[in-house]
Image: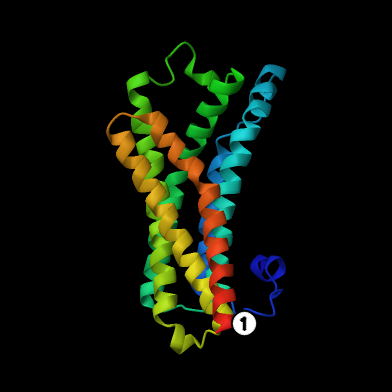
Amino acid sequence: MIRKKLFRERNSVFHLRGKEIQRIETFSDAIFAFSISLLIMSLEVPQTFEELEIIVHNFLPFVATVLLVALFWREQNRYFRHYGLGDALVVWLNILLLVVILFYVYPLKFLFSLLLSMFTHANYFPKAGDAVIIQAHDFPSLILIYSVGYAVIWFLFFLLYEIAWYRRVQLRLNRFESAVTKKELRGAFLNACIGVCAMIFAGFHAPVPAGICFLMIPLVLWFVDWRMKHELIISESN
C-alpha cells in the first residue's frame, strides 16, 4: 500500500495509533487517484508540435492542482495515522471531504490556468478560440467558487480534529500529542476563516481583497506553529 511506503512511522514522539489501513482510506486513495486522473484525461495526445506546446504550457496549472490535492491527501493520511479513528461520524465526514475535493479539481485548474495566463500572457485556453475566457464581472464569482471549496475543505478538517480533541482522553494523548492536535485544530479553523473572509469579499464584488486573504496562509502556518511551541514551553516550565 502506497500510504505505508510513503508515510512510515518517523515521529517517535507522536504515537501512531492508526497503523492498519482502513477501508475508508483505501476508498480515499481511489478518489484522490481518480481526481488526478480527471486532470490527466483532460490532456489529449498531441497531433502537432503546436498542440505539444499547448500541453507544455498547461503543465504548470496541472502541477499546481495536483500539489494542492496531494496536500489534502497528506493531511487526511496524517489524521488517520495519528488517531486511528474510523467510526461512522469520521467516515461520513471523510466522504463529504472527498466529494468536495472531487468537485474542486476542475475549478481549481481553471483558476490556476487563468492566473498564469494573466501573469505570463501565455494561451492556456486554446480551445476557447476568440471567445472571452472570463468577463471582469465574473471574476468575483470565480473567487467565490474557489473560496467556498477552500473553506468547506478546511472546515471538514476542523471537525475531524475537533473529534480527535474531544476524544483525547480516550486516545490517551500525551502532552506533545495534545499540543499537535490543538495546532492542527487551530490551523484548520483559521484556514476555514480565510476562505470565509474571501467569500465575503467576493460576495461584495471585491476580488482583490478576496485574493489578498489567501496571502494570509503563510502567516497562519507560522502562527499555529509558534503557538504550539509557546504552549509546550509554558507547560514544561510548570
The outermost residue toward the front is 237
- Identify the residue at image location x=59%, y=60%: 74
Q: Nearer the viewer, residue 77 or 49?
A: 77
Q: Which residue is mark 1?
A: 15
User: Residue 82 vs residue 209: left or right?
Assistant: right
Type of residue at label 1? His
Query: In this picture, is 56 found above or below 64?
Result: above
Query: In this picture, is 46 found above or below 210?
Result: above
Please say whether residue 17 is visible from this viewpoint: no
- Identify the residue at image location x=33%, y=32%: 141
x, y percent for residue 16: 61, 80
x, y percent for residue 120: 61, 21
Q: Nearer the viewer, residue 50 or 19?
A: 19
Q: Secondary structure at mark 1?
A: loop
Tell me the quarter of the image containing the C terminus. Answer: bottom right
x, y percent for residue 111: 48, 33
Q: Quadrant of residue 198?
A: top left
Tell me the quarter of the image containing the N terminus. Answer: bottom right
x, y percent for residue 168: 45, 83
| Color encoding of the figure | rainbow
Mark 1 surroundings: few (<14), some (14-19) or many (≥20) residues within 10 A: some
- Identify the residue at image location x=51%, y=67%: 183
Q: Nearer the viewer, residue 225 or 141?
A: 225
Q: Quadrant of residue 233?
A: bottom right
The outermost residue toward the top is 130
Q: Quadrant of residue 57?
A: top right
Give the total of numbered labels. Answer: 1
User: Residue 125 vs residue 88: left or right?
Assistant: right
Please say whether residue 34 is visible from this viewpoint: yes
